Amino acid sequence: MMTKTDFDMLKMVRPNILKLKPYQSAREQINDEDAILLDANENPFPSGYNRYPDPLQRKLKMALGKWKNLSPDNLFLGNGSDEIIDLLIRAFCIPGKDSVIINVPTYGMYEVCAKINDVKVIRVALDNNFQIVPEELIAAAANSKIVFICSPNNPTGNLIRKDLMLEVLEKFKGIVVVDEAYIDFADEPGGIAELEKYPNLVILQTFSKARAMAGIRIGMAFMNAEIIQILNKIKYPYNISKLNQEAALKALENNALQSGIKAMKEQKEWLVSELQKLTTVDKVYPSDANFLLVKFQNHQDVFERLRREGIIVRDRSKEPNCERCLRITIGKSIENRKLMTCLKHFEQIKI
Ligand SMILES: *Cc1c(COP(=O)(O)O)cnc(C)c1O
């Protein structure tokens, strides 16, 4: 396969963003550790956090680059993946004119971010196996700037087939965002290896799921360095706090990732087999993530009764092709057992 050649980033970016001269910190060009810093009106007395953080998060990106086997130049960090989704839309889509494609049912933030920016959302349905349909997607995307593909998909839990994804990358001339928030739970490596071939590919990952760091709001994106330069121009200069950069670095030093994933998988396997024994459960969808999409006969009752027992799950029944479905995150063993005890109890007293 050849490297994609029909991607012209300069034609894709909004003209006002291309022209934009970004805010410049006086410190960006200076690498002198002993410099006397009288440029940013900070308080000179140390509190641990009296200085602005590194706007380009260089130390954290070095560590992440080693983990992902990527150059720091191909890494972008956001205040959660949600910030990166918003920045991509703002960089490429002209409000009131451009559109993005989403494959439904999927993660809600693509649509919310697009609408906040007055960018049109074209919804293409996933097929009955919750796979993307490249022909339909490409036909719908003729004038779109961005296609969002979520793999493993939220809320359905399945990986998107690689051959289908590559077909979209080959044929679509805009940006293809592949959201891999749950990829660490899957038994496949995801799309990082494709970055070299596809300058229009943006991969999103996050500290929020397998890394167990949702509280620090760090999303990662991997893409060609040209797009990163554009995003760096429009992000808030200090979008990742020093506290959060430090916490992320620390999280990378500890090796609990694989054991956490293994424990989650054991719990998932147990929950699947238990849920399948219930007569109120019509279907447990296969999951490559840390949650299950479950079709109940009586999802509303189940939802409300769990709520009364203090167990919160997500009602996804209004999503296309998800009638009567609840999305259940895999919890700790004790939480999952409590969930099953409740569900079995409901069944005995007939709901
Ligand atoms: C949870 C999730 C994210 C993570 O978003 P953050 O802002 O990084 O916490 C991204 N995409 C999908 C599909 C998710 O489900």
Image: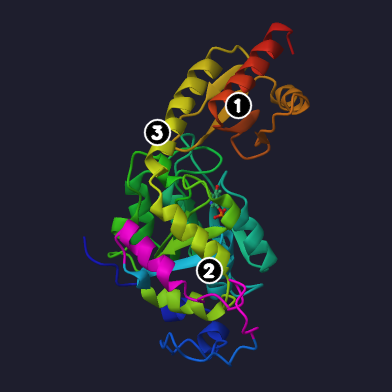
Give the mark nearest the N terminus, 1 or 2. 2
User: Which quarter of the image is occupied by the N terminus?
Assistant: bottom left
Q: Nearer the viewer, residue 66 or 181?
A: 66
Magenta span main SS: loop
Whether label 1 touches label 3, CB < 8 Å: no
Nearer the observer, disc 1 or disc 2?
1
Residue that mark 1 sits on: 335
Q: Can you tell which quarter of the image residue 312 is in?
A: top right
Amino acid under label 2?
Leu
Amino acid under label 3?
Lys
Q: Nearer the viewer, residue 256 or 338?
A: 256
Q: Nearer the viewer, residue 51 or 219?
A: 51
Residue 16 inside the magenta-drawn segment: no
Amino acid under label 1?
Glu
Residue that mark 3 sits on: 262
Element carrying mark 2: helix
- First to last magenta residue range: 42-70
Q: Residue at x 44, y 37 (%)?
A: 260
User: Which quarter of the image is occupied by the C terminus?
Assistant: top right
Residue that mark 2 sits on: 88
Q: Please state the horizontal and vertical placement of residue 185, each as a whole percent of the image.
A: 42, 40
Most extreme residue toward the left is 1
What's the distance in space between the residues labelled 1 and 3, CA to CA?
A: 17 Å
Q: Please state the horizontal and vertical placement of residue 110, each as a whole percent of the image.
A: 59, 57
The label on residue 282 is none
Element carrying mark 3: helix
Q: Please state the horizontal and vertical placement of residue 173, each as a whole percent of the image.
A: 40, 67
What's the distance in space between the residues labelled 3 and 2, CA to CA?
A: 33 Å
